[in-house]
Structures are given as structure tokens and as C-alpha cells.
């Protein structure tokens, strides 16, 4: 059966000391709760090795927010999947809308990133989602389907089964405007159907699909109660241990 997961995406926030403090606080909070979901924090590259040293990996997973589309070589400033794996991190967010929007990531580069992540034992948390205009002009479902097909449908069923997906409607990210639980459920059910059509019902049923976009303690419970919403990818609310834990404990 698929897992319930709450993952934090810290984005470009926290200095190293601040990040270590936050990671320690989340780790400590998890000692006192019986979490009903897997909990992951995805931090800036600069923090990974240090955070890895201070968390209990049995309770708290660690991931990066991106990796390069090349294995190694003359790509100044890039961080490869093997480098990420060497820090102790075991997850990597790929295809986040901010990467697609501001850094020109395409399905072609994402295909390479997914392959390299898997080759290096990293679990991709692969993001998909439409912008406001696409939601309003009725193409949201086509857009999300194309994002999945173009970057992921070259994978074998076995490799596809290693992915975590995150549906993040771009219009809901950092805007305070959450998709309603019914809107999230409708898209998550659609995504699961797209997976089932390609890889079969079993793979689709076993794929965790997270919701992201202004998820917070006050709305997490209603979102996570939906049958096809298997947890959340959390931005702003992951930057405070108490609010992040408020979302983790939305699973009962
Ligand atoms: P917010 O939770 O800040 O809206 O960000 C969501 C997100 O982009 C997580 O990847």
C-alpha cells in the first residue's frame, strides 16, 4: 500500500545555523509523537551533510531540492545526484514549478534528472501542476497529464514505482490560496488514473501523490482526509517546527 508522507521544502531559506536549528527542532518533536506518516525535510544543498549528522534517519528523511541533469563534469555551480547521495540524503525534489518557471527546466532535462536520481538511489519527489491561466481556461488536466507523460513515461513500471509525485497548483504556491480539498482530490484521482492507464492499477494504487500549495495545520486535515491525497509537500509552513508538526499530526 502507498505511504502517507509529509515533506518540507525549505526552498532558499535559512542559513546553515538556522537550518540546523530547525532540523533539530523537527527531529526532537518527532521523538514525542507517533507519526502516522513518513516525514521528510528537503533543505538547501549547503545544509544536507550537516543536517544528516544531527537527525534520526529512522524518523526523519532528508532530501535535496534539485540536482543536475549531468553526472559530473564542467558544469560550474551545479550539484549532481551522486553528490547529493554522498551527503546521506535519500530524496530529491525534481520539477518544482519554481525551477520550471525561473530556471527554464523542461521535461527533457527533468527526464535526465529523474534517471540520474534513480541511478544514485535517490527517491524523486516529482512536482507537477498548472498555472492559474491553465486552471481558468480549462486545460489544467491536459497540462498535468503532459507533464507526467513527457518526463516520466519513459520509465519502466519498476522505476516509476519508486517515485513520489506532488501535485502543486502554481496558483496556490505561497499565495495563501489553497486548492479546496475537492479540487485537490479531483486532480489527484485524475493523476492516479493517468498512471493506471500506463502502468496498471497496482502501480497507480501504490504511488503516493502529495498535495502542495499553501498547505498549513488549519487545512491539512481536510486535504489529507481525501482518498487520493497521500500527504503534502510543504513550503512556508515547513520553516517553523511547530507548524510543520501541526501538518504531520494531521494524519491520525
Ligand atoms: P507553500 O506551502 O509555501 O505554498 O509552498 C508549496 C511548495 O511549493 C512546496 O514545494
Image: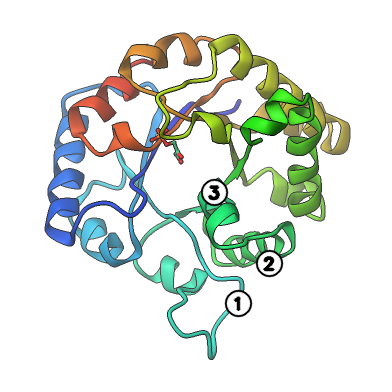
Q: Position of residue 116 (x, y in %)?
A: 61, 67
The disc, 2 or 1, on the residue closer to the chain's N-terminal end is 1
Mark 1: few/some/many CA within 10 Å (<14, 14-19, 20+) = some
The image's mark for residue 32 is: none
Q: Is mark 3 within 8 Å of ligand 1?
A: yes
| In the foreground, 58 or 102 | 102
In the image, farthest residue toward the bottom:
74
Name the residue: 86% across, 38% down.
198
Can see residue 184? yes
Q: Are marks 2 and 1 in contact (CB under 8 Å)?
A: yes
| Image x and y of residue 146, in percent | 80, 43
Mark 3 against mark 2, which lies toward the viewer? Answer: 3
> Residue 68's image quarter?
bottom right
Say above or below: 203 vs 177: below
The secondary element bearing badge 1 is classed as: loop
Q: Residue 70 got which mark?
A: 1
* Left/right of residue 9 with respect to residue 71 in the rendered view: left
Amino acid at each position: 500500500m502507498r505511504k502517507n508522507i509529509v515533506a518540507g521544502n525549505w526552498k532558499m531559506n535559512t542559513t546553515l545555523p538556522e537550518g540546523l536549528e530547525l532540523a533539530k527542532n523537527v527531529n526532537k518533536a518527532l521523538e514525542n509523537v507517533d507519526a502516522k506518516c513518513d516525514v521528510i525535510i528537503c533543505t538547501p544543498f549547503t545544509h544536507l551533510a550537516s543536517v544528516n549528522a544531527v537527525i534520526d534517519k529512522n524518523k526523519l528523511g532528508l532530501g535535496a531540492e534539485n540536482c543536475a541533469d549531468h553526472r559530473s563534469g564542467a558544469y560550474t555551480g551545479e550539484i549532481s545526484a551522486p553528490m547529493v547521495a554522498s551527503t546521506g540524503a535519500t530524496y530529491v525534489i525534481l520539477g518544482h514549478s519554481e525551477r520550471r518557471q525561473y530556471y527554464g527546466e523542461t521535461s527533457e532535462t527533468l527526464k535526465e534528472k529523474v534517471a540520474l536520481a534513480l541511478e544514485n538511489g535517490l527517491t524523486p519527489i516529482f512536482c507537477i501542476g498548472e498555472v492559474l491561466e491553465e486552471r481558468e481556461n480549462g486545460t489544467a488536466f491536459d497540462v498535468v497529464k503532459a507533464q507526467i507523460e513527457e518526463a516520466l513515461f519513459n520509465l519502466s513500471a519498476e522505476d516509476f514505482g519508486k517515485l513520489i509525485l506532488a501535485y502543486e497548483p502554481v496558483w496556490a504556491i505561497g499565495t495563501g490560496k489553497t486548492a479546496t480539498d475537492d479540487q485537490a482530490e479531483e486532480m489527484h484521482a485524475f493523476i492516479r488514473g493517468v498512471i493506471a492507464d500506463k502502468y496498471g492499477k497496482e502501480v497507480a494504487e501504490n504511488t503516493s501523490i502529495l498535495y502542495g500549495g499553501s498547505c498549513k495545520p488549519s487545512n491539512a486535515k481536510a486535504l489529507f482526509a481525501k482518498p487520493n491525497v497521500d500527504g503534502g509537500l510543504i513550503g512556508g509552513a515547513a520553516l517553523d517546527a511547530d507548524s510543520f508538526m501541526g501538518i504531520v499530526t494531521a494524519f491520525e
